[in-house]
Amino acid sequence: MDRREEEERMKLLDEMREYSKRALEESGSSYNSIGRLIQDIIAVVEIIKCK
């Protein structure tokens, strides 16, 4: 791997790192998905408790 390829890979890694950080921030997609999953689990538990 030459220097240019290495620099390109490092740039891609930096971009991926930034996307991952954003996904986990409070307004990020992963953060929101986990929040919805927790809400769904709570709703199911409430339904089960009422039966």
Image: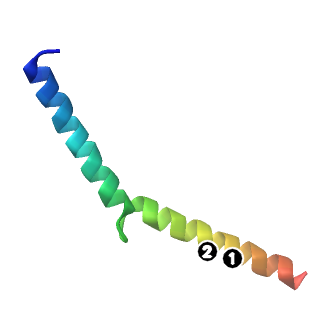
Q: In the displayed structure, does residue 2 sit left or right of residue 38?
A: left
Mark 1: give few (<14), some (14-19) or many (20+) Cα within 10 Å. few
Q: Quadrant of the C terminus?
A: bottom right
Residue at the image position 8 percent from the left and 22 percent from the top: 4
Q: Secondary structure at mark 2?
A: helix
Which colour style is shown? Answer: rainbow
39 over 18 or under it: above or below: below
Q: Quadrant of the N terminus?
A: top left
Residue at the image position 20 percent from the left and 30 percent from the top: 9
Q: Residue furthest bottom?
A: 50
Residue at the image position 28 percent from the left and 48 percent from the top: 17
7 over 43 or under it: above or below: above
Q: Secondary structure at mark 1?
A: helix
Query: Do tag 2 and tag 1 residues touch (Cβ < 8 Å)?
Result: yes
46 over 5 or under it: above or below: below
Mark 2: give few (<14), some (14-19) or many (20+) Cα within 10 Å. few
| Image mark for residue 42 | 1
| Image mark for residue 29 | none
Residue 43 position within the rendered picture, expressed as x and y whole percent measured from the top left: 70, 77
| Image mark for residue 39 | 2
Q: In the displayed structure, does residue 6 sit left or right of residue 45?
A: left
Q: How far is disc 2 from disc 1 in space, using C-alphas?
A: 5 Å
Q: Amino acid at mark 1?
A: Ile
Q: In the displayed structure, does residue 9 sit left or right of residue 44?
A: left
What is the quadrant of residue 12 in the picture?
top left
In the image, 16 versus 37, the foreground residue is: 16
Residue 7 position within the rendered picture, expressed as x and y whole percent measured from the top left: 12, 29
45 over 9 or under it: above or below: below
Q: Amino acid at mark 2?
A: Gln
